[in-house]
Amino acid sequence: MKSKWAKEMPKKLFKAMSEGYSFGGACGVLGISRATGYHWVEKHKEFAEAHARGQEKRLMFLEERAISLMEYSKDRSAALVIFLLKTADRKQYGEELQKQAPPEDPLDNMPDDVLEKKAIQVMRQRGLKVVGSSKKET
């Protein structure tokens, strides 16, 4: 299969990304897959440079759109622009995921003999037969 590479591809990539397209979307505009686009980034220096400049220009486009929406629009698409900003530059606009410890289980700190006694009580309440208990019942 013949490559679709042409010397104007970097310029087309930059133009599409500067209009707000993601790299994958811009590749679609060029008629290539994202995988081919990344292959070209590795193979063609000018395409790699257009990709890097396009990323910056795309971010600027999205920032300008967000500012415009905040100032002049009552449009609900502001949430979409915020989403696009977060995905366009996770470092600058992304929310850091909070690593939360799971809530402490009170059973974790309960002594084994107390835990066993409670388990036996629950089993009896549910009408289950208790077999093999290490404690004698009183």
Image (tube, rainbow, N blue to C red):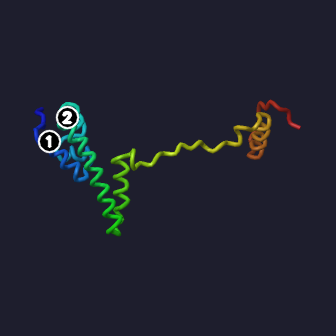
Does residue 90 appear left or right of residue 47 in this picture? right
Question: Which is more N-terminal, label 2 or label 1?
Answer: 1
Q: Can you identify the residue that label 1 sits on? A: 9
Q: Quadrant of the N terminus?
A: top left
Q: Residue 30 at x, y = what percent?
A: 16, 45
Per the image, label 2 sits on a secondary structure element best described as helix
- Image-quadrant location for residue 49: top left
Residues at marks 1 and 2, CA–CA distance in whole angstroms: 10 Å
Q: Can you identify the residue that label 2 sits on? A: 40
Q: Quadrant of the C terminus?
A: top right
Q: Residue at x 19, y 38 (%)?
A: 47
Q: Residue 17 at x, y = what percent?
A: 23, 48
Q: Does the residue at mark 1 contact the one at mark 2 (Cβ under 8 Å)?
A: yes
Does residue 38 appear left or right of residue 1 in this picture? right
- The circle on residue 106 is none
Residue type (three-letter) at the residue carrying disc 1: Met
Rendered view: 127 above or below 82: above
Residue type (three-letter) at the residue carrying disc 2: Trp
Quick one: label 2, few (<14), some, or many (20+) residues within 10 Å? some
Quick one: label 1, few (<14), some, or many (20+) residues within 10 Å? some
Q: Residue 68 at x, y = what percent?
A: 31, 63
Q: Which residue is drawn at 36% across and 61% down?
A: 78
Per the image, label 1 sits on a secondary structure element best described as helix
